[in-house]
Structures are given as structure tokens and as C-alpha cells.
Image: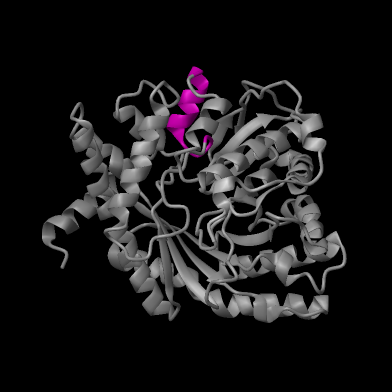
Amino acid sequence: MINFSEVSETNAMIEKENLDVRTITMGISLLDCIDSDLETLKKNIYDKIYKSAKDLVRTGEEISHDYGIPIVNKRISVTPIALIGGSACRSTDDFVELALTLDRAARDVGVNFLGGYSALVSKGMTGADRLLIESIPDALSRTEFVCSSVNVGSTRTGIDMDAVRLLGRVIRETAEKTADRDSLGCAKLVVFCNAPDDNPFMAGAFHGVTEADRILNIGVSGPGVVKKALESVHGESFEVLCETVKKTAFKVTRVGQLVAREASQRLGVPFGIIDLSLAPTPAIGDSVADILCEMGLEYAGAPGTTAALALLNDQVKKGGVMASSYVGGLSGAFIPVSEDQGMIDAVKAGALTLEKLEAMTCVCSVGLDMIALPGDTKASTISGIIADEMAIGMVNQKTTAVRVIPVIGKGVGEQVEFGGLLGYAPIMSVNPFSCEEFIARKGRIPAPIHSFRN
């Protein structure tokens, strides 16, 4: 039972501390849509998505109204399209046709984003995988709601460096094709190592082949709630600090559990997981960087930042798993630059660099996220950044990701506006030295020795 004081406390979190359910994401399997005829496949995909998700937005709004809990986004994830389109798509243009179909379906059911224009290539690429990856620049420049992801590595298989090299070029081309929108297409593309099958957050969500036909995954978020709680124990010991984060994460997750239960019952779709991630927004007071500063850092990026982030990530997970039996996705702390006002301030102050962000990704739940790069950054340099981040994930048996935006026509120190939840960002400097010969090598980096566990 939830008592009156808990209700009052939750209301305060919502009204004053930016507590929200960041997303209800419906995962939809498209495996039963596969057909060798492209037109039939497109019809099957549209019909399956529309039939499955036509009530998703309305239901989310009703739950939000009934319980007074903000549900910011309603989203869809689908089976990786490289798998679904393999028998029908003979060219990149064919895959773009599928992207346009996904976009139309997302628009018609009213969701904010649809993820799953994806390929899983950690050990190698099929012909369909390569065609889909090469189609990404066109697909993202011609769609509004579609998000794309490519998993290029894992602890068990190593890193597909051919895919890493290709994606450096694809990110550059995506930036160029959306240059009139400050290269916004790249904000809808993420490269993974150890990508989870049940992630509800964009741009990396896809519906894994091990999942049920339909599933509901919930993403909760409350950086402002955690910061407010830490203000009450300012200067206390690490033990008190950890207990405070853990208890707060428990309360936040209970809100997500309530929404998950209601949405599952009303839609008749099984509940999958709750993702415990602290996902910031550009709003003042809704920042992961501000939590780190409340712990005692002048800016995110100062010495001690990685330790503080490791503490935060671990305690969020420890508190959350006590509030829900089904925790999954990414779960931890996101450190996007453009979506977090505290991170933006740290970059402007010179406290936070690309190299420090890379170090922080060793202990956070994702990786290099929403980072604006100079528009003249080489494709090989982007591939090198991806390779470094994939290596961190592979060796440390964790999910890592790269979502970088080379902003065509802009340079270091300039600012780029993305709008909405994507926020704005100062363009960060990149190491100027070349990795071109390294990236030009063919093949894959083998899995680390500790991957052999059979």
C-alpha cells in the first residue's frame, strides 16, 4: 500500500523536481511481416504497427491524466529492419522505402519516435546489413520519426571494424544530407557495442528477436529528484550519500512500475522491463551534471568526476532493482552533452573534454552521446572515436554507444540548436592527429580472452 505521505512526496517530485516517466515504448515484432515482395512487405509492416499501437498514445495520455504523472514520450521499437527487409530489398532505395513506411506508420499512430531501422553486425555484415547501413543517410534525411542504430561489437564476438569504417562515412554523409538542419539526422543514429534487446530509449531502441510479439518497456527519469534529495545531505559521508541515492531511485522506480502495470492492463500487452536511467533534459534542474556538482565537484569533468558518476550509477541500480522485478534496457545515468544543461555549462567552462567524457563512459550506462563535432571532422576520425568507445564496452562487458553530430559549416566554439529534448550544444574540439591507416585495416578486432565462458 502507498500511504498519504508517499503520495504527497511523489506529487512534490512531479511538480517541483521534474520527475517524469520519460517514455512508454511498445516493442513490436515484424518477423511475421517478412515477404519477398517489397510492396507486400511494406503493407504488412504498416498494418502490423498500426494495429498494435493505434491506442498507445491515447492510453498514455489517459494514465498521465488519471495519476497526474507526466509521460513525456510514447514510442515504438521494431525488429531490426535489416532482418525484415533481407529477402525483399535489393538496393539502398528499397530499404529507404521501408524507412518511409515506418515513418508513415509512426505519424499515423501519433508517437514521438520509432526505433529499429537497425542492423546487428558485431561479427560481420550480410548483404542486407550493408545495404541498410549505406541507406541510412537517405533514410534519416527523408523521415521525421525514424531512428537508426547499428550494433558493431560485443564482448563475445569482438568489433567488426569493417562496419566501424563504413559508419564513419555514413555519419559524415548523414550530416551533409541534413546540413540545412544543423546535421540533425545524426542525432537519430547511434552506434552500439553490446546493445540490449529491450532498450526503450531513442535513438537506440529496437525490438530484439528474443522478445515476445509485442511488449511494453518503460523508461523512468528523475535527475532533479536525486539532486534535491542530495541537497538535504550536503557534506555527509559517502555512506549517507549512497543510501540517499538508493532510496530516491527506489521511489522513482515505483512510479514507473505503476505506469507499467496500468499501461499493460489497459493495452493488453505484456510488461517487459523498466529502464532505470537518469535521462536529463535541457530544462534547468533536470541535469545529471548537477547531481555530480551537488556531490562536491565544481563542474562535471573536474578530477573525481568518474568516481562520482560510478557511485551514482551503481546506487541508482541498487535502489531500482528493489522496486521492480523486471529491470533492463540501459539502466543507469545518461551523460548526453546537448540534452543536459550542466554538461553544456561544463563544456563552455573548459572543464569537460571529449577525452574526459570517454573516461566517464567506462562507468555510466551508455557512452558518447549527443556530442557536436566540427563540420570538417574526417570520416576516419569519427570511425576512430567509435572504435575507442566500442573497445571500452567490449573489454568491460557493458553497453557503450556513440551518437556524435559533425555539424557541417560550423567549428569549435560555435553553438548548434537542435530544439526540444535534444537541446543545444557547443561544438567540441577533436584530437587533430590521424588514425586513417589504423581504420583502413580490414576485418575485426577479436573478442577479449575473458569472453570465453562456455
In-front residue for pair 316/339: 316
Let me know if residue 60 appears in the view: yes
- Measuring 22% from the left and 49% from the top, which residue is drawn there? 247
Q: Left or right of 13: which side holds 187?
A: right
In the rendered image, the vertical position of residue 125 relative to residue 18, given as above or below: below
Of all residues shown, which one is farthest toward the top? 350
In-front residue for pair 320/288: 320
In the rendered image, the vertical position of residue 101 relative to residue 139, given as above or below: below
Residue 339 inside the magenta-drawn segment: yes
Residue 310 inside the magenta-drawn segment: no
In the rendered image, the vertical position of residue 24 relative to residue 441, given as above or below: below
| Residue 76: percent from left, percent from top | 56, 65
Start-end of magenta stretch: 337-350
| Residue 32: percent from left, percent from top | 66, 81
| Residue 360: percent from left, percent from top | 48, 33
Q: Where the N terminus falls, by quadrant?
A: bottom left
| Residue 187: percent from left, percent from top | 63, 45
Q: Left or right of 411: which side holds 279?
A: left
Q: Where the C terminus falls, by quadrant?
A: bottom right
In the rendered image, the vertical position of residue 219 relative to residue 234, given as above or below: below
Q: What is the quadrant of residue 320 in the picture?
A: bottom left
- Measuring 58% from the left and 50% from the top, which residue is drawn there? 155
Of all residues shown, which one is farthest toward the left? 4
In-front residue for pair 240/427: 240
- Measuring 43% from the left and 81% from the top, which residue is drawn there? 268
Q: Left or right of 89: which side holds 385?
A: left
- Measuring 79% from the left and 62% from the top, which residue is drawn there? 126
